[in-house]
């Protein structure tokens, strides 16, 4: 007897120091709906990770009680001046900013562009 096991693969998109990770929505507060959204802007370069919805689709922005950011996307493009444009498929994603550990200060900081 053969068992068929279906596994749903999680979608993960890496774009420089930004990571979009597909998650299941839980206990979130909706902030707003937009057609384009800046995920991060370079402090020194001024370059932006810009998410732009396709046609009439909107990007729904949510936050949890810890301040983490989540996006409900129904198709969008993620652009940046120094990275390849990514097509982001329909899904519910957590926005994760890359962090680095400073062993001298013993602190964890967000990576700056």
Image: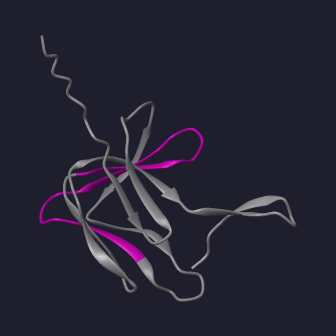
Q: Is residue 88 magenta?
A: no
Q: Is residue 72 magenta?
A: yes
Furthest toward the right, the residue is: 104
Task: Residue 34 in the image: state x and y as whole percent.
Answer: 30, 61
Q: Residue at x 57, y 47 (%)?
A: 67
Say if 27 sits above or below 2 in the image. Answer: below
**Quarter of the image where one finds residue 30:** top left
Furthest toward the bottom, the residue is: 45
- The quadrant of the picture occupied by the C terminus is bottom right
Task: Residue 101 in the image: state x and y as whole percent.
Answer: 73, 62
Task: Residue 10 in the image: state x and y as whole percent.
Answer: 32, 43
Q: Residue at x 20, y 28 (%)?
A: 6
Task: Residue 15 in the image: state x and y as whole percent.
Answer: 40, 69
| Magenta stretch prevailing secondary structure | strand
**Quarter of the image where one finds residue 108:** bottom right
Q: Which residues are magenta?
A: 49-73
Furthest toward the front, the residue is: 1
Q: Residue at x 20, y 52 (%)?
A: 74
Would residue 34 be found to the left or right of residue 95 on screen? left
- The quadrant of the picture occupied by the N terminus is top left
């Amino acid at each position: 007897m053969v068992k068929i096991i279906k596994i749903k693969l999680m979608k993960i998109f890496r774009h420089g120091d930004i990571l979009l990770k597909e998650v299941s929505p839980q206990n979130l507060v909706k902030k707003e709906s937009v057609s384009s959204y800046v995920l991060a802007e370079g402090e020194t370069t001024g370059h932006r990770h810009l998410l732009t919805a396709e046609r009439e689709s909107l990007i729904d922005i949510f936050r949890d009680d810890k301040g983490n950011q989540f996006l409900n996307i129904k198709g969008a493009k993620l652009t940046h001046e120094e990275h390849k444009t990514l097509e982001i498929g329909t899904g519910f994603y957590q926005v994760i900013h890359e962090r680095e550990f400073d062993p001298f200060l013993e602190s964890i900081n967000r990576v700056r562009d």
